Structures are given as structure tokens and as C-alpha cells.
């Protein structure tokens, strides 16, 4: 009897989600918890980009933005395309490739 109650209680608390009365309140709670604990959804890609300096110099802005966002660096650089390209080259090229 006690085991049945315990399992029911655990199942109810861990698997059943009771939505809040206000729309969007659950999302706000999750965002606040993530900020407080430092939890991020960023995952490091398995492969390092294999572009050469010339590739970065000729890369279109959308592609530079996508590359920086893929590695979690998109929010670190704002500005012109030239600024983004220089940042990407500094981040992904070895010193002897610059």
C-alpha cells in the first residue's frame, strides 16, 4: 500500500505538468531558472570549421552569421560584415594562417 502511494506520488510530481494560469508564465520560469543556474542549450559542434583566410574574406554575411551562431559566438560581435569576418578569422584561424 505504501509502495503504491510512493510510486503514484513520484510519478505525479515528475511526469505530470500542470500548466500555470497565465499564458507564458511557464516559459518565463524556465528562462529565469536557466539564468540563475547558468544552464545553456549551446552544444559545441563536433568539427572545427575548415575555411581558409580567403574563404572568410569572400564569405557572405548570412554565412558568417550562421557560422558564429553555430559556435555560440553570434552575440559577441555586432557591426559590419567586415567586423564579423575579422572576428571569425581571429576565432577560427591559427596564427600562421592569418
Image (tube, rainbow, N blue to C red):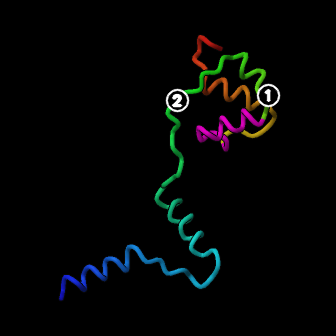
The residue range painted magenta reads: 62-75
Q: Give how far across and how far down residue 65 sits, in percent.
A: 72, 38
Quadrant of the image occupied by residue 48: top right
* Label 1 vs 2, first from the N-terminus: 2
Quadrant of the image occupied by residue 73: top right
Residue 47: numbered disc: 2
On screen, 66 above or below 40? above
The reply to whether the magenta stretch includes residue 56 is no
Residue at (60% x, 22% y) in the render: 50
From the viewer's perspective, tell me whether residue 72 is left or right of residue 37.
Answer: right
Is the magenta region chiefly helix, strand or loop? helix
The reply to whether the magenta stretch includes residue 69 is yes
Residue at (72% x, 20% y) in the render: 55
From the viewer's perspective, tell me whether residue 83 is left or right of residue 3.
Answer: right
Figure quadrant of the C terminus: top right
Residue 82: numbered disc: 1
On screen, 64 above or below 26? above
* Disc 1 secondary structure class: helix
Amino acid at each position: 500500500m505504501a509502495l503504491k502511494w510512493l510510486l503514484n506520488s513520484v510519478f505525479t510530481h515528475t511526469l505530470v505538468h500542470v500548466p500555470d494560469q497565465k499564458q507564458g508564465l511557464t516559459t518565463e520560469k524556465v528562462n529565469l531558472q536557466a539564468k540563475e543556474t547558468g544552464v545553456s542549450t549551446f552544444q559545441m559542434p563536433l568539427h572545427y570549421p575548415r575555411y581558409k583566410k580567403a574563404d572568410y574574406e569572400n564569405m557572405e554575411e548570412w554565412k558568417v552569421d550562421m557560422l558564429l551562431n553555430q559556435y555560440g559566438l553570434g552575440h559577441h560581435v555586432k557591426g559590419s560584415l567586415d567586423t564579423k569576418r575579422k572576428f571569425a578569422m581571429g576565432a577560427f584561424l591559427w596564427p600562421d594562417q592569418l
